[in-house]
Amino acid sequence: NEVGAQQPLGFFDPLGLVEDGNQAKFDRLRFVELKHGRISMLAVVGYLIEEAGVRLPGEISYDGTTFADIPSGFDALSAIPQAGLLQIMLFAGVLELFVMQDVTGEGEHVGDFRNGALDYGWDTF
């Protein structure tokens, strides 16, 4: 019945982040954990697709650089034009501040951003 208690370990908080039993703080930490996990999964999929040689058609900048010219992995950071990196960061910021929110208050759990729009019936299993 404790916040964060789960069988078979029970309450497990080795860093003492929620030892005060604050439910709001626990929910915030769970939300951040889910968000970072989702971002990590998308990053792995993106890396695997790039490494497999799948690229978008066309040019990435006006100087004639194509998407196929951009290398995979961390080497891409130095090959993408600065304006492109700025656009990526701006897009991520817009998603963070305006899109990935529980705006309707209908979320069934922490990190539920469906906002009543999607229901694939997973909760009936």
Image (tube, rainbow, N blue to C red):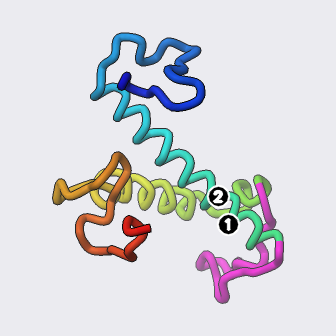
Tag on residue 72? none
Secondary structure category for the residue under label 2 = helix
Q: Is residue 11 above or below residue 66?
A: above
Q: Is residue 8 above or below residue 95?
A: above
- State which quarter of the image contains the C terminus: bottom left
Q: Position of residue 104 (x, y in %)?
A: 16, 59
Dots 2 and 1: beta carbons under 8 Å? yes
Q: Amino acid at mark 2?
A: Ala
Q: Position of residue 46 (x, y in %)?
A: 67, 66
Name the side, left or right, on which 46 lies relative to 97.
right
Tag on residue 43? 2
Q: Residue at x 35, y 34 (%)?
A: 27
Q: Residue at x 42, y 56 (%)?
A: 90
Q: Residue at x 76, y 53 (%)?
A: 74
> Which span of residues is magenta-colored?
52-73
User: As drawn, which residue projects farthest toward the left?
Assistant: 104
Q: Position of residue 109 (x, y in %)?
A: 33, 49
- The local crowd at label 1, few if under 14, some if 14 to 19, many if 20 or more residues have their Cα within 10 Å, is some
Q: Amino acid at mark 1?
A: Gly
Name the side, left or right, on which 108 lies relative to 65.
left
Secondary structure category for the residue under label 1 = helix
Name the side, left or right, on which 104 lies relative to 88.
left
Q: Report the residue marked by disc 1.
A: 46
- In this view of the protein, which residue sits in the foreground, 13 or 121? 121
Q: Position of residue 77 (x, y in %)?
A: 70, 55
- The local crowd at label 2, few if under 14, some if 14 to 19, many if 20 or more residues have their Cα within 10 Å, is few
Total numbered circles = 2
Q: Is residue 74 above or below residue 124?
A: above
Q: Residue at x 79, y 64 (%)?
A: 72
